[in-house]
Image (tube, rainbow, N blue to C red):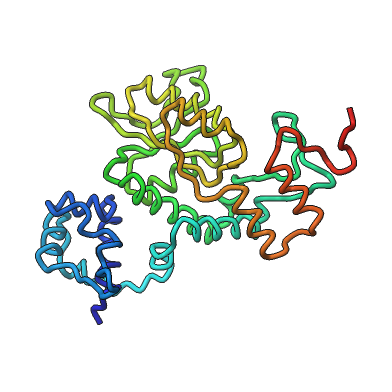
Amino acid sequence: MLTHEKIWLAIDRLANVFGYSPSGLAKQAGLDPTSFNKSKRHSPDGKPRWPSTESISKILSVTGATMSEFIALIDDDDEHYKAISAMDKDEIAKKTAQILLDTKSVLFNAREPFTLKSGRASPVYIDCRRLISFPKERSFLMDAGAQMLANDIGAENIDVVAGGETAGIPYGAFVAERLGKPMIYVRKEPKGYGRMAQIEGHLPEKGETNVILVEDLQTDGGSKKIFVDALREAGAQVKHAFVVFHYGIFAASEQNMKDMGITLHALATWWDVLALAKEQNYFDKETLTSVEAFLNDPERWEPAGQEGVA
């Protein structure tokens, strides 16, 4: 049965298959870019609005898809895809937080805090590399990430996906595959032999190539500069970065992104994880209280029993 929901779902899927956002597909077909916006799919009084046969004909023409292929998209009862398409950013953040907790990719321990690379003591720790070993969970995160980028940037505005060495490489590959885009990866420094390359893969040398940088996480964003500078020196336009997880607790993160002219896209932050941990009582009250204190003031936080110790 060709329901209102399924027709619009097929249009969304067609756009995704050919590397467009719904608005990008409409524009490419010569339609008003807002024609396929979700806000246009119902009238102000809630009545369903159907796409015209003319608009469907135009998007089939511009993509080269046949009517039978379009119908196949309608008939494909992909609940996983449908569920992600219906989720807003808050719902995606909550699901991401759930996955991080369930896979033990985030840990809380206020009594025996972790030592971060900076030497700072922290009651929270995240290991996004661990996520690549969980195919079902990984699939959701990458599908959600690709959808976020298609909606926020427009897949048609992304020419190449770049993974940052090393943890960003698998995520860059996953995102590139879903968006149907070329992938490269960027080293922290040029390798010391051969071509002395810092960028691996093929990056077009001529014209404005829009590259999105992909990494596993962001703390304050300072390390992104190495990759962004290397890409820009090679002639790429870099205006966006994507991470699975953004700490969301350091003021320097926002400032560093602003200084580099980068818009950051992330699936979840520590605040999303804390909210879910509280809601589901993942940890005892003492731990949650201490973690919240750290997230509110990570520079001054001290483990329990050490407050005021010089």
**Could you say which quadrant of the image residue 231 lies in?**
top left
Seen from the viewer's position, the closer of residues 85 and 131 is 85
271 up-or-down from 222: above or below: below
Q: What residue do we see at 44% from left, 22% from top?
A: 229
**Could you say which quadrant of the image residue 220 lies in?**
top right
Q: What residue do we see at 48% from left, 31% from top?
A: 257
Q: How many marks?
A: 0
The quadrant of the image that shows the N terminus is bottom left
Q: What residue do we see at 34% from left, 44% from top?
A: 153
Residue 279 position, x and y percent, is 66, 64
The quadrant of the image that shows the C terminus is top right
8 up-or-down from 230: above or below: below
Residue reaching furthest to the bottom: 1
**Relative side of 132 to 159, left or right:** right
Seen from the viewer's position, the closer of residues 210 and 275 is 275
204 up-or-down from 135: above or below: above
Residue 147 position, x and y percent, is 38, 54
Residue 187 position, x and y percent, is 49, 27
Residue 7 position, x and y percent, is 24, 71
Seen from the viewer's position, the closer of residues 99 and 269 is 269
**Relative side of 163 to 308, left or right:** left
Q: What residue do we see at 51% from left, 28% from top?
A: 256
**Relative side of 212 to 289, left or right:** left
